[in-house]
Amino acid sequence: MSMNKVLLVDDERIILEGISTLIQWNDFDAQLIGTARNGIEALQFIKEQQPDIVISDIRMPGMDGLQLVEAARGLYPELAFIMLSGFDDFHYARKAMQFGVKHYLLKPCNENLIIDALKEVIGDLQQTRKKEQFMRHMELELAKALPHAKEQFLKELVTNKMYGQRDWEEYRRLFHISEDLGYIQLILLQLEGSYEYEHLFAVKNIAEDVLGSSIVQLGTTIGSQVLLLLKASYAKEWLFTRLEQIKRTYHEYYRLDLTIAVSDTATISRVRNMYHDTLECLNYRFYLGEGAIITTNDLINLRSDTPSFYFEEGQLSFFMKSGDWHSAESEINRYFQELSECRLDTAMSKSYALSLLVSITRHSMQEESNDYMPTIAKLEELHTLRAIEQYILEVAQQITTTNLQIQQKKHSSIVERVIDIVQKHLDQSTLSLNWIANDVLFMNVDYLGKLFKKETGEKFSNYVMRLRIEKAINIIESSNDVKVFELAEQLGFGDNPQYFSQVFKKHTGQTPTEYRKSPSISE
């Protein structure tokens, strides 16, 4: 805890010297850092040294104590004052209180009165600092949670029919979105080909960087797609130039394509309709090709009088890549149920089924994708929608099962590498999940933490602490003269042997010293 810095101000030298020497400042977490003979000299000292507490006489030449309080509090509102005066005049006390002074002592006053006032002022300062520290901590925690909250809100906004204008206004204020948003536009970016989960975040970051924070109001990931809500304050040419730049940048880094759907501009009240428009645009990429930029205008020549059919394949993509066959099967069943209800002609229904099958085969391993090409031609031999559904289910199950085996092997390999890193760096105080994820494996830290817990059944932090305590026990049992601070340094606790002792006792019920002296070790 830092000492509270005190400035003593009085035009009488004997009082300055008396108070300076009579009070044992260190006993009260205080430090006398200087004295001044008048208000002018004190104000200059305050500007240069910024003390926490000023003990000042009221009656002084040049600038008196009340003038000093008024000038200093104007510059430093948190500065605390204790006022001394030889005049028993309520007028001075009242004026001092108007400037926020809580302690007004009459001369002559002994050191006990000053000490009591000093204790109370220091107590008030400590309470204020605790509140400020708490608020800073809360602000930091909120800053961490806010991006996730914004992403979840956008998902709810475009999919939840219960969200209305009032909800938008409340969240707009929470997320500091411009009040004069006016017209908006939705951009939906579809990842094509075989991609990793981290690619979604890469696309989102590239898009937000290229378009700029003044344009992108909200962004989120939904399945295999990235959704952006833009403030429509730009020319069409400007937008499409930057969408091409996003596609080009992503392809340069990952050699993969992006298909981009662009909604019309409208007010926020139509955001759900706009989202459905972008989904419909993506459904037509079978006709227009992957890697295209598709707008609602591109669909005019493709639409007919038959009922429209669109299906968001993001969830199915996620379930297949993660090896969750039960969920993937449900998504495929729902796909064909909705396709059947549209009652499209045979050719159109087969084209939608073919689009789904092509999408499904892309989730196989790159070297196996060509093996599934004959399965696409077989669709022409099937004459009922039910038969097509069963056939696609068989292909999807085979690919999903293979992906599950690959994921399990990949996850085990990653966790084994994490365990190896921990073993090699157990003595380093910088060892943490954040460090491993960001600086060693270049992975999303939340994803790595969940993967480690799933594979080992133990949180990463608990695992590291358990290993350190087990190693400490081995060292103590093999060496009777090892010091606690040496153990702390060897096991990644740095120069904090006290914290190491606390952790050791929490795990073993004894401090390291007690454990070393226990009968089982002594023998």
Image (cartoon, rainbow, N blue to C red):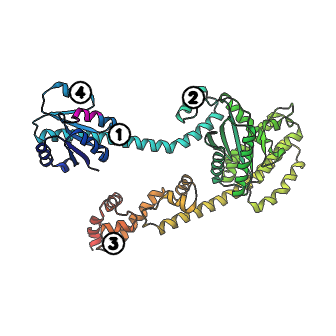
Q: Nearer the viewer, mark 4 or mark 1?
A: 4
Distance from the alpha carbon under mark 2 to that under mark 1: 30 Å
Q: Compared with residue 386, is residue 410 higher up or lower down, i.e. above or below?
A: below
Which one is nearer the viewer's eye here, 374 or 234? 234
Residues rendered magenta in the picture: 62-70
Distance from the alpha carbon under mark 4 to that under mark 1: 28 Å
Residue 25's disc number = none
* Image location (x, y in percent) of residue 374: 85, 56
Q: Of helix, strand and loop, which one carries label 3?
A: helix
Distance from the alpha carbon under mark 4 to that under mark 2: 46 Å
Amino acid type, callout 2: Glu
Amino acid type, callout 3: Glu
First of labels 1, 3 by sequence position: 1
Which one is nearer the viewer's eye here, 196 or 133? 133
Are the residues tagged 4 and 3 within 8 Å (C-beta)? Answer: no
Residue depicted at x 41% and y 43%: 136
Circle 1 residue: 131
Circle 4 residue: 95
First of labels 2, 1 by sequence position: 1
- Magenta region includes residue 69: yes
Neighbour class for label 4 at 10 Å: few (<14), some, many (≥20)?
few
Circle 2 residue: 169
First of labels 4, 3 by sequence position: 4
Q: Is residue 50 left or right of residue 336?
A: left
Residue depicted at x 32% and y 75%: 479
Q: Nearer the viewer, mark 1 or mark 3?
A: 1
First of labels 4, 2 by sequence position: 4
* Image location (x, y in percent) of residue 67: 25, 33
Amino acid type, callout 1: Lys
